[in-house]
């Protein structure tokens, strides 16, 4: 079974903390993505990566950074967590090859910043 | 990527077919129609995709109109476990600078009743 695994299902952090959300995929996919999901706003793309050490900003990158040191792992970093970053965070991966392959999602990390 | 329009919510009786419409009137010739669903508190799950021909798999059927400006996802025998938010997404295939990123709308909340 193909798998995208996010390190935590639930996380509670304090305002100002540096937060790391980890995502690992076992499908040798080139492309990986981080989304956040909020009620009424749907899923919004934060950052994506198309290769090791390569990254591109998504629609809402402010307050976030990412790291892709290995192909299978894509980390989302909240440099200084704030309460407005309380959200569900979803990681996805997809192969770069082929014309029309699907993306696979992790189960999500529900982050609460207090 | 082309925008999509879906009804906010739909109901369906268990055992009946669920037909979920999607309008994508600005779709380009190289853009695919994808369907994902998200069951409460889980990550989105791929269902099916197509370019211009109708498609069927073990989960659903996808009917795309001849002008490709709309499509319908059909769950032939809906069960209670099919209750979820269904997203219709239009995007280009691999290549270019999109790297396969998915832009999610609000989706359709499908509720299957006993």
Image (cartoon, helix red, strand yellow):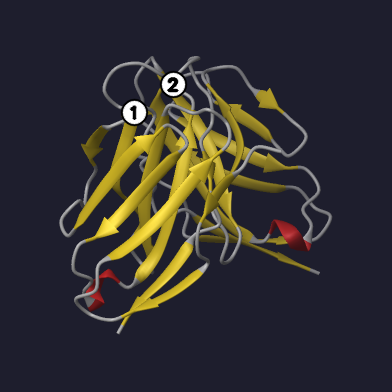
Q: Residue at x 20, y 62 (%)?
A: A79
- Give B70 or B112, whichever is nearer the viewer: B112
CA neighbours of label 1 inside 10 A, class few (<14), some (14 to 19), many (20+): many
Q: Are marks 2 and 1 on the same chain?
A: yes
**In the rendered image of this protein, does residue A11 appear above or below residue B71?**
below
- Give B75 or A76, whichever is nearer the viewer: A76
Q: What quarter of the picture does the C terminus of chain A occupy?
A: bottom left
- Give B38 or B18, whichever is nearer the viewer: B38
Q: What quarter of the picture does the N terminus of chain A occupy?
A: top right
Identify the residue at the far left of this view.
Answer: A62
Q: Residue at x 68, y 40 (%)?
A: B74
Q: Position of residue B21 (x, y in %)?
A: 54, 43
Name the N-terminal-most of marks 2 and 1: 1
Q: Residue at x 46, y 64 (%)?
A: A109
Identify the residue at the far front of this view.
Answer: A69
Q: Position of residue B104 (x, y in %)?
A: 39, 47
- Give B79 or A16, whichever is nearer the viewer: A16
Among the 4 quarters of the image, the one containing residue A49: top left
Q: Is residue B89 visible?
A: yes
Pinpoint the chain carrying mark 1: A
**In the rendered image of this protein, does residue A111 appear above or below residue A30?**
below
Among the 4 quarters of the image, the one containing residue B12: bottom right
Relative to B57, A36 lies left or right: left
Q: Position of residue A30 (x, y in %)?
A: 43, 26
Mark 1 sits on what residue? A50
Q: Residue at x 57, y 29 (%)?
A: B49
Mark 2 sits on what residue? A96
- Give me the disc on residue A16: none
**In the rendered image of this protein, does residue A103 appear above or below residue A101?**
below
């Amino acid at each position: 079974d193909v798998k995208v695994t996010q390190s935590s299902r639930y996380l509670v952090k304090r305002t100002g903390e540096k937060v790391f959300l980890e995502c690992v995929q076992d499908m040798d996919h080139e492309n990986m993505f981080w989304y956040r999901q909020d009620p009424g706003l749907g899923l919004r793309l934060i950052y994506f990566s198309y290769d090791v050490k390569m990254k591109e900003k998504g629609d809402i990158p402010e307050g976030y950074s990412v790291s892709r040191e290995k192909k299978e792992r894509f980390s989302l970093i909240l440099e200084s967590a704030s309460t407005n970053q309380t959200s569900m965070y979803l990681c996805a991966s997809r192969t770069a090859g082929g014309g029309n392959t699907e993306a696979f999602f992790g189960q999500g990390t529900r982050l609460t910043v207090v | 990527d082309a925008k999509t329009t879906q009804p906010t919510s739909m109901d369906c009786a268990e055992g009946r077919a669920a037909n979920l419409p999607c309008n994508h009137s600005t779709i380009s010739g190289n853009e695919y129609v994808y369907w994902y669903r998200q069951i409460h508190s889980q990550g989105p799950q791929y269902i099916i995709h197509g370019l211009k021909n109708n498609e069927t798999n073990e989960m659903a059927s996808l009917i795309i109109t001849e002008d490709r400006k709309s499509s319908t996802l059909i769950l032939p025998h809906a069960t209670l476990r099919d209750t979820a938010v269904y997203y219709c997404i239009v995007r280009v295939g691999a290549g270019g600078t999109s790297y396969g990123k998915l832009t999610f709308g609000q989706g359709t909340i499908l509720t299957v009743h006993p």
